[in-house]
């Protein structure tokens, strides 16, 4: 008699490994990369006025928000039935029984509480805009899969604002735009430098692509438990096209940025250097399905990390500040 994987009782890993797994460390590059790029661009534009201390604290804030979001997502998906024995993705600590739902929710609260404390401190130093970022980040971390109208479960169609998935919008806004521009404004920058905004949009596209892979892989189990992601609402081909277009436009905009908005000329080399990885990811998304998409979550995260590190490197070594401004 063959014993199936579901019938096998898995031994519980050590506590440190359980906590590490629950935090999903492979996703943390999505918060590290935009903050690093944002700080390098800030240094490029403001010189010694760039505040590395504030940038570092904001990075810790962003990581804690992401960990809190991951933990609360783990808790809420388990409670709502999205994470069961049929889950196709990587193991979740609550799903496996390594943490109880109460423990997972408690860890999420702790992480978001620490993030709130750092955000409040930065707000006192930098102004009301950081208050807004702090409170909305914490709110959205919980609202993503929790509360009566979870962002990950409900598209915007139900409130007559079109058919854009709020989960995708949350990732793009907070792990793209906000995380990239925050170091600039924390250092006293004004206006909206075009190269900063281009980098924010492109990194936001790639961060969103990570969640698109998850939603594409999980669309059948999500549909069964009422999780209304874009992949559930509009189907497999929509999600595939969304992914390909996000990756494509991140590369196109970056390639054109030196000629359109005064970004360092070396930025044009970034999409060339990452094109092989990008094409491989896109081909895999078009060809694979179900559990076979698991490697492409990590590969997309690595693509964003490589893309961001190259942007940061080429910004740091550029000899002059050439950024123009959209406003101010």
Image (spheres, helix red, strand yellow):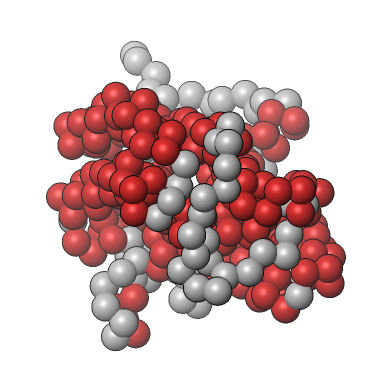
Q: Is residue 53 above or below residue 307?
A: below
Quadrant for the N terminus in the image: top left
On screen, residue 63 above or below 118: above
Image position, residue 155 (x, y; %): 34, 71
User: In which quadrant of the rendered view does residue 226 lie?
Assistant: bottom left
Residue 58, can we see it?
Answer: yes
Position of 222 with respect to 118 (left or right) is left
Q: Where in the figure is residue 212, as x and y percent of width and height?
A: 34, 49
In which image quadrant can residue 98 be found?
Answer: top right
Q: Which residue is drawn at 58% across and 59% down?
A: 181
Q: Which residue is drawn at 18% across and 37% down?
A: 286
**Which one is in front, 107 or 54?**
54
* Quarter of the figure with the C terminus: bottom right
Drawn side of residue 127 relative to residue 262, left or right: right
**Is 127 in front, or is 261?**
261
Front-most of 80 and 70?
A: 70
The residue shown at (52%, 33%) is 314
257 versus 11 height, above or below: below
Residue at far top of view: 1
Q: Report if residue 199 is visible in the image.
A: no
């Amino acid at each position: 008699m063959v014993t199936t994987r579901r019938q096998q009782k898995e031994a519980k890993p050590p506590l440190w490994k359980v906590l590490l797994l629950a935090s999903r460390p492979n996703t943390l590059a999505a918060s590290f990369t935009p903050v690093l790029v944002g700080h390098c661009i800030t240094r490029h534009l403001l010189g010694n006025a760039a505040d590395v201390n504030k940038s570092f604290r904001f990075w810790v804030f962003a990581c804690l928000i992401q960990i809190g979001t991951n933990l609360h997502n783990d808790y809420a998906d388990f409670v709502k039935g999205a994470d069961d024995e049929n889950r196709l993705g990587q193991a979740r600590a609550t799903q496996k029984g390594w943490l109880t739902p109460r423990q997972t929710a408690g860890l999420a609260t702790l992480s978001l509480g620490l993030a709130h404390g750092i955000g409040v401190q930065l707000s006192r130093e930098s102004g009301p805009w950081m208050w807004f970022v702090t409170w909305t980040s914490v709110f959205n971390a919980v609202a993503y899969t929790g509360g009566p109208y979870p962002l990950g479960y409900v598209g915007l169609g139900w409130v007559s604002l079109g058919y854009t998935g709020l989960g995708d919008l949350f990732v793009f806004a907070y792990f793209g735009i906000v995380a990239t521009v925050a170091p600039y404004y924390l250092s006293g920058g004004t206006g909206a430098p075009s190269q900063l905004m281009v980098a924010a949009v492109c990194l936001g596209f790639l961060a969103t692509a990570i969640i698109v892979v998850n939603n594409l892989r999980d669309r059948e189990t999500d549909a069964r438990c009422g999780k209304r992601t874009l992949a559930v609402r509009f189907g497999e081909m929509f999600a595939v096209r969304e992914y390909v277009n996000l990756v494509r436009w991140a590369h196109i905009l970056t390639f054109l940025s030196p000629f359109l908005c005064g970004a360092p000329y070396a930025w044009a080399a970034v999409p060339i250097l990452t094109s092989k990885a990008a094409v491989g990811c896109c081909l895999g998304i078009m060809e694979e399905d179900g559990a076979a998409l698991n490697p492409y979550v990590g590969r997309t995260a690595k693509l964003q990390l490589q893309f961001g590190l190259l942007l940061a490197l080429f910004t740091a070594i550029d000899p002059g500040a050439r950024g123009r401004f959209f406003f101010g």
